[in-house]
Image: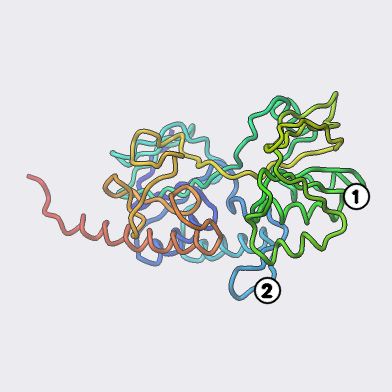
Amino acid sequence: MQNYEFDTIILGGGPAGLSAGIYASRGAVSTAIIDINMFGGQPSNYLELENFPSYQTVGGYDLMEKFEEHADKFGVQKFPMQEIQTVDLKNKTVSTLDATFKAQTIIIATGAQPMKLGVKGEKEFLGRGVSYCAVCDGAFYKDKTVAVVGGGNAAVEEGMYLTKFASKVYIIHRRNELRADKIVQERAFKNPKIEFIWDSVVEEIKGSDLVNSTVIRNVKTNNLSELHINGIFPYIGITPNVELFNGQLEQDAKGFIITDNTMKTSVEGIYAVGDVRTTPLRQVITATADGAIAAVYAVKYIETLKELPEKV
Protein backbone atom coordinates (compact mmCIF):
# COMPACT_ATOMS: atom_id res chain seq x y z
CA MET A 1 0.00 0.00 0.00
CA GLN A 2 1.48 3.31 -1.12
CA ASN A 3 0.92 6.67 0.51
CA TYR A 4 0.79 9.91 -1.49
CA GLU A 5 0.45 13.53 -0.44
CA PHE A 6 -0.61 16.33 -2.78
CA ASP A 7 -1.82 19.87 -2.36
CA THR A 8 -4.86 19.15 -4.52
CA ILE A 9 -6.56 15.89 -5.43
CA ILE A 10 -9.07 15.88 -8.26
CA LEU A 11 -11.54 13.02 -8.41
CA GLY A 12 -12.48 12.47 -12.05
CA GLY A 13 -10.59 12.89 -15.32
CA GLY A 14 -13.25 14.31 -17.62
CA PRO A 15 -13.22 17.87 -19.00
CA ALA A 16 -13.96 19.43 -15.60
CA GLY A 17 -11.28 17.43 -13.81
CA LEU A 18 -8.62 17.90 -16.47
CA SER A 19 -9.32 21.62 -16.65
CA ALA A 20 -8.99 21.84 -12.87
CA GLY A 21 -5.72 19.93 -13.08
CA ILE A 22 -4.30 22.35 -15.64
CA TYR A 23 -5.23 25.42 -13.60
CA ALA A 24 -4.12 23.96 -10.28
CA SER A 25 -0.72 22.93 -11.64
CA ARG A 26 -0.25 26.36 -13.19
CA GLY A 27 -0.92 27.73 -9.71
CA ALA A 28 2.24 25.93 -8.53
CA VAL A 29 0.54 23.38 -6.30
CA SER A 30 1.14 19.66 -6.49
CA THR A 31 -1.83 18.09 -8.25
CA ALA A 32 -3.14 14.58 -8.81
CA ILE A 33 -6.14 13.35 -10.78
CA ILE A 34 -7.68 10.03 -9.81
CA ASP A 35 -10.26 8.25 -11.96
CA ILE A 36 -11.92 4.86 -11.81
CA ASN A 37 -11.69 4.70 -15.62
CA MET A 38 -9.35 6.07 -18.25
CA PHE A 39 -9.31 9.84 -18.63
CA GLY A 40 -11.66 11.74 -20.92
CA GLY A 41 -15.04 11.18 -19.28
CA GLN A 42 -18.30 11.02 -21.22
CA PRO A 43 -17.15 13.28 -24.11
CA SER A 44 -14.70 10.57 -25.16
CA ASN A 45 -17.74 8.58 -26.35
CA TYR A 46 -19.12 11.41 -28.50
CA LEU A 47 -18.56 11.01 -32.20
CA GLU A 48 -18.52 14.77 -32.79
CA LEU A 49 -18.83 18.01 -30.86
CA GLU A 50 -19.78 21.14 -32.75
CA ASN A 51 -20.28 23.66 -29.95
CA PHE A 52 -16.79 23.85 -28.43
CA PRO A 53 -15.21 27.20 -29.41
CA SER A 54 -12.39 27.15 -31.98
CA TYR A 55 -13.65 23.86 -33.45
CA GLN A 56 -16.44 23.74 -35.99
CA THR A 57 -16.53 20.00 -35.35
CA VAL A 58 -14.19 17.83 -33.33
CA GLY A 59 -14.24 14.21 -32.26
CA GLY A 60 -14.95 13.80 -28.57
CA TYR A 61 -12.03 11.43 -28.07
CA ASP A 62 -9.68 13.73 -29.98
CA LEU A 63 -10.68 16.76 -27.92
CA MET A 64 -10.22 14.99 -24.60
CA GLU A 65 -6.86 13.63 -25.74
CA LYS A 66 -5.75 17.26 -26.20
CA PHE A 67 -7.05 18.10 -22.70
CA GLU A 68 -4.96 15.26 -21.29
CA GLU A 69 -1.85 16.32 -23.21
CA HIS A 70 -2.30 19.84 -21.85
CA ALA A 71 -2.49 18.49 -18.28
CA ASP A 72 0.66 16.43 -18.90
CA LYS A 73 2.50 19.57 -20.00
CA PHE A 74 2.03 21.12 -16.57
CA GLY A 75 3.02 18.02 -14.65
CA VAL A 76 -0.32 16.81 -13.35
CA GLN A 77 0.09 13.38 -11.77
CA LYS A 78 -2.45 10.95 -13.21
CA PHE A 79 -3.84 7.84 -11.55
CA PRO A 80 -6.30 6.16 -13.94
CA MET A 81 -8.17 2.90 -13.38
CA GLN A 82 -8.22 3.29 -9.61
CA GLU A 83 -10.84 1.42 -7.63
CA ILE A 84 -11.75 4.02 -5.01
CA GLN A 85 -12.84 2.46 -1.72
CA THR A 86 -13.52 5.44 0.52
CA VAL A 87 -13.36 9.23 0.46
CA ASP A 88 -13.16 11.14 3.75
CA LEU A 89 -13.93 14.73 2.81
CA LYS A 90 -13.42 16.18 6.29
CA ASN A 91 -9.91 14.75 6.54
CA LYS A 92 -9.32 15.05 2.77
CA THR A 93 -8.24 11.46 2.34
CA VAL A 94 -8.90 9.11 -0.57
CA SER A 95 -8.31 5.37 -0.28
CA THR A 96 -8.07 3.03 -3.26
CA LEU A 97 -7.21 -0.65 -3.45
CA ASP A 98 -3.56 0.23 -4.03
CA ALA A 99 -2.90 3.49 -2.25
CA THR A 100 -3.92 6.21 0.19
CA PHE A 101 -3.99 9.82 -0.98
CA LYS A 102 -3.89 12.81 1.36
CA ALA A 103 -4.44 16.42 0.28
CA GLN A 104 -5.20 19.93 1.48
CA THR A 105 -8.05 20.32 -1.00
CA ILE A 106 -10.23 17.97 -3.01
CA ILE A 107 -12.02 18.86 -6.23
CA ILE A 108 -14.90 16.50 -6.99
CA ALA A 109 -15.34 15.97 -10.74
CA THR A 110 -16.91 12.53 -10.80
CA GLY A 111 -19.61 13.47 -13.31
CA ALA A 112 -22.92 11.73 -13.80
CA GLN A 113 -24.35 8.69 -15.52
CA PRO A 114 -27.48 8.02 -17.56
CA MET A 115 -30.68 7.56 -15.62
CA LYS A 116 -32.33 4.19 -15.94
CA LEU A 117 -35.90 3.67 -17.15
CA GLY A 118 -36.57 1.35 -14.25
CA VAL A 119 -38.75 -1.02 -16.26
CA LYS A 120 -38.89 -4.78 -16.60
CA GLY A 121 -36.32 -6.05 -19.09
CA GLU A 122 -33.97 -3.08 -18.89
CA LYS A 123 -31.45 -4.74 -16.63
CA GLU A 124 -31.96 -8.20 -18.14
CA PHE A 125 -31.19 -7.04 -21.69
CA LEU A 126 -28.31 -4.71 -20.92
CA GLY A 127 -25.74 -5.34 -23.63
CA ARG A 128 -28.25 -7.45 -25.54
CA GLY A 129 -30.35 -4.67 -27.01
CA VAL A 130 -30.32 -2.11 -24.19
CA SER A 131 -27.55 0.47 -24.45
CA TYR A 132 -26.82 3.93 -23.06
CA CYS A 133 -24.17 4.79 -25.66
CA ALA A 134 -25.11 5.09 -29.33
CA VAL A 135 -21.52 5.82 -30.37
CA CYS A 136 -20.32 2.70 -28.58
CA ASP A 137 -22.96 0.30 -29.90
CA GLY A 138 -24.61 1.90 -32.92
CA ALA A 139 -22.68 -0.18 -35.45
CA PHE A 140 -24.30 -3.36 -34.08
CA TYR A 141 -27.66 -2.18 -35.45
CA LYS A 142 -26.87 -1.90 -39.14
CA ASP A 143 -30.11 -2.20 -41.14
CA LYS A 144 -32.08 -2.82 -37.94
CA THR A 145 -34.80 -0.91 -36.08
CA VAL A 146 -34.03 0.88 -32.83
CA ALA A 147 -35.74 3.23 -30.39
CA VAL A 148 -34.37 6.16 -28.46
CA VAL A 149 -36.16 7.32 -25.31
CA GLY A 150 -36.07 11.01 -24.43
CA GLY A 151 -36.57 14.47 -25.85
CA GLY A 152 -33.46 16.46 -24.97
CA ASN A 153 -30.33 17.17 -26.98
CA ALA A 154 -28.68 13.89 -26.07
CA ALA A 155 -31.67 11.79 -27.15
CA VAL A 156 -32.22 13.57 -30.45
CA GLU A 157 -28.56 13.84 -31.38
CA GLU A 158 -27.93 10.18 -30.59
CA GLY A 159 -31.04 9.27 -32.54
CA MET A 160 -29.64 11.06 -35.57
CA TYR A 161 -26.32 9.33 -35.10
CA LEU A 162 -28.05 5.95 -35.08
CA THR A 163 -29.55 6.66 -38.54
CA LYS A 164 -26.03 6.11 -39.89
CA PHE A 165 -26.58 2.41 -39.20
CA ALA A 166 -30.22 1.62 -38.45
CA SER A 167 -32.88 1.50 -41.12
CA LYS A 168 -35.43 3.03 -38.72
CA VAL A 169 -35.12 5.07 -35.53
CA TYR A 170 -38.10 5.77 -33.28
CA ILE A 171 -37.77 8.56 -30.74
CA ILE A 172 -40.16 7.99 -27.85
CA HIS A 173 -40.93 11.08 -25.79
CA ARG A 174 -43.33 11.51 -22.87
CA ARG A 175 -44.40 14.98 -24.06
CA ASN A 176 -45.71 16.33 -27.35
CA GLU A 177 -42.72 18.55 -28.01
CA LEU A 178 -38.95 18.22 -27.69
CA ARG A 179 -36.65 19.91 -25.20
CA ALA A 180 -33.69 19.75 -27.60
CA ASP A 181 -32.22 22.91 -29.13
CA LYS A 182 -34.16 24.18 -32.15
CA ILE A 183 -31.34 23.51 -34.59
CA VAL A 184 -31.14 19.91 -33.36
CA GLN A 185 -34.90 19.49 -33.66
CA GLU A 186 -34.94 20.79 -37.22
CA ARG A 187 -32.31 18.31 -38.32
CA ALA A 188 -34.20 15.44 -36.75
CA PHE A 189 -37.55 16.42 -38.26
CA LYS A 190 -35.93 16.44 -41.70
CA ASN A 191 -34.37 13.01 -41.29
CA PRO A 192 -36.50 10.43 -43.17
CA LYS A 193 -35.31 7.56 -40.97
CA ILE A 194 -36.63 9.13 -37.76
CA GLU A 195 -40.20 8.76 -36.52
CA PHE A 196 -41.45 10.38 -33.32
CA ILE A 197 -43.80 8.69 -30.88
CA TRP A 198 -45.26 11.45 -28.73
CA ASP A 199 -46.88 11.44 -25.28
CA SER A 200 -45.53 7.97 -24.58
CA VAL A 201 -43.37 6.14 -22.06
CA VAL A 202 -41.73 2.72 -22.03
CA GLU A 203 -43.44 0.17 -19.78
CA GLU A 204 -41.43 -2.96 -20.58
CA ILE A 205 -38.59 -4.23 -22.76
CA LYS A 206 -39.14 -7.71 -24.19
CA GLY A 207 -37.16 -10.34 -26.02
CA SER A 208 -35.66 -13.81 -25.85
CA ASP A 209 -31.89 -13.82 -26.20
CA LEU A 210 -31.97 -10.27 -27.60
CA VAL A 211 -34.46 -7.40 -27.45
CA ASN A 212 -37.25 -7.77 -30.00
CA SER A 213 -39.90 -5.32 -28.79
CA THR A 214 -40.91 -2.73 -26.23
CA VAL A 215 -44.28 -2.04 -24.66
CA ILE A 216 -45.17 1.66 -24.65
CA ARG A 217 -47.98 3.51 -22.94
CA ASN A 218 -49.64 6.67 -24.15
CA VAL A 219 -49.70 8.96 -21.11
CA LYS A 220 -52.90 10.70 -22.27
CA THR A 221 -55.02 7.66 -23.13
CA ASN A 222 -53.18 4.96 -21.11
CA ASN A 223 -53.40 2.71 -24.18
CA LEU A 224 -50.63 0.11 -24.44
CA SER A 225 -48.97 -0.88 -27.70
CA GLU A 226 -46.04 -3.05 -28.66
CA LEU A 227 -43.29 -1.69 -30.86
CA HIS A 228 -41.03 -4.18 -32.64
CA ILE A 229 -37.41 -3.09 -32.34
CA ASN A 230 -33.94 -4.62 -32.13
CA GLY A 231 -32.44 -2.17 -29.67
CA ILE A 232 -33.34 0.63 -27.28
CA PHE A 233 -31.28 3.61 -26.10
CA PRO A 234 -32.59 5.51 -23.03
CA TYR A 235 -31.56 9.17 -22.78
CA ILE A 236 -33.93 10.45 -20.12
CA GLY A 237 -31.49 12.38 -17.96
CA ILE A 238 -28.54 11.83 -15.68
CA THR A 239 -27.87 11.01 -12.05
CA PRO A 240 -24.72 12.22 -10.23
CA ASN A 241 -21.90 9.88 -9.26
CA VAL A 242 -21.95 10.76 -5.58
CA GLU A 243 -22.09 7.42 -3.77
CA LEU A 244 -18.71 8.08 -2.18
CA PHE A 245 -19.79 11.46 -0.81
CA ASN A 246 -23.41 11.03 0.22
CA GLY A 247 -24.02 12.42 3.70
CA GLN A 248 -20.70 14.25 3.85
CA LEU A 249 -21.76 17.51 2.20
CA GLU A 250 -24.82 19.45 1.10
CA GLN A 251 -26.72 18.04 -1.90
CA ASP A 252 -29.99 18.85 -3.64
CA ALA A 253 -33.04 16.58 -3.79
CA LYS A 254 -31.58 14.67 -6.76
CA GLY A 255 -28.21 14.19 -5.14
CA PHE A 256 -26.28 16.81 -7.10
CA ILE A 257 -23.68 18.64 -5.00
CA ILE A 258 -24.52 22.23 -4.09
CA THR A 259 -21.77 24.81 -4.57
CA ASP A 260 -21.36 28.56 -4.48
CA ASN A 261 -20.07 30.53 -7.46
CA THR A 262 -16.47 29.64 -6.59
CA MET A 263 -17.39 25.92 -6.77
CA LYS A 264 -16.92 25.61 -3.01
CA THR A 265 -19.14 23.03 -1.30
CA SER A 266 -20.46 23.06 2.25
CA VAL A 267 -17.21 21.43 3.43
CA GLU A 268 -14.15 23.63 3.87
CA GLY A 269 -11.53 22.97 1.20
CA ILE A 270 -13.83 20.80 -0.92
CA TYR A 271 -14.97 21.92 -4.37
CA ALA A 272 -17.28 20.29 -6.95
CA VAL A 273 -17.29 20.85 -10.70
CA GLY A 274 -19.02 19.70 -13.87
CA ASP A 275 -22.00 17.38 -14.12
CA VAL A 276 -21.83 16.27 -10.49
CA ARG A 277 -22.88 19.67 -9.14
CA THR A 278 -26.13 21.62 -9.30
CA THR A 279 -25.81 23.68 -12.48
CA PRO A 280 -28.18 25.09 -15.12
CA LEU A 281 -26.13 23.75 -18.05
CA ARG A 282 -24.09 20.59 -18.48
CA GLN A 283 -21.76 20.96 -21.45
CA VAL A 284 -18.03 20.46 -22.03
CA ILE A 285 -17.47 24.21 -22.06
CA THR A 286 -19.23 24.79 -18.74
CA ALA A 287 -17.42 21.84 -17.18
CA THR A 288 -14.05 23.30 -18.17
CA ALA A 289 -15.06 26.68 -16.76
CA ASP A 290 -16.10 25.03 -13.49
CA GLY A 291 -12.73 23.28 -13.32
CA ALA A 292 -10.82 26.51 -13.86
CA ILE A 293 -12.80 28.39 -11.20
CA ALA A 294 -12.48 25.61 -8.62
CA ALA A 295 -8.75 25.24 -9.15
CA VAL A 296 -8.09 28.97 -8.83
CA TYR A 297 -9.97 29.11 -5.52
CA ALA A 298 -8.43 25.86 -4.31
CA VAL A 299 -5.00 27.40 -4.86
CA LYS A 300 -6.07 30.50 -2.92
CA TYR A 301 -7.29 28.27 -0.11
CA ILE A 302 -3.98 26.41 0.02
CA GLU A 303 -2.11 29.71 0.13
CA THR A 304 -4.16 30.82 3.15
CA LEU A 305 -3.30 27.58 4.93
CA LYS A 306 0.39 28.25 4.43
CA GLU A 307 -0.04 31.73 5.91
CA LEU A 308 -1.67 30.46 9.11
CA PRO A 309 0.63 30.29 12.17
CA GLU A 310 1.65 26.81 13.24
CA LYS A 311 -0.18 25.40 16.23
CA VAL A 312 1.97 25.11 19.35
Q: Quadrant of the N terminus?
A: top left
**8 to the left or right of 225:** left
**307 to the left or right of 77:** left
- How does the figure colour the protein chain or chains? rainbow
Q: Nearer the viewer, residue 146 or 190?
A: 190
Q: Residue 95: give x, y in percent of width and height.
A: 42, 35
Residue 149: mark in rendering: none
**Among all residues in the image, which is located at the extreme bottom?**
54
Q: Is residue 272 above or below residue 248?
A: below
Residue 56: mark in rendering: 2
**151 to the left or right of 80:** right
Q: Residue 250: give x, y in percent of width and height.
A: 34, 41
Q: Amino acid at mark 2?
A: Gln
**Among all residues in the image, which is located at the extreme left?**
312
Residue 209, quarter of the rendered image? top right
Q: Residue 223: give x, y in percent of width and height.
A: 76, 31
- Real-space Cα distance between discs 2 and 1? 28 Å
Q: Amino acid at mark 1?
A: Ser
Residue 115, quarter of the rendered image? top right
Q: Nearer the viewer, mark 2 or mark 1?
A: 1
Q: Residue at (77%, 39%) from the top-left corner?
A: 232
| Circle 1 residue | 167
Secondary structure under the numbered disc 2 in the rendered image: loop
Residue 197, quarter of the rendered image? top right
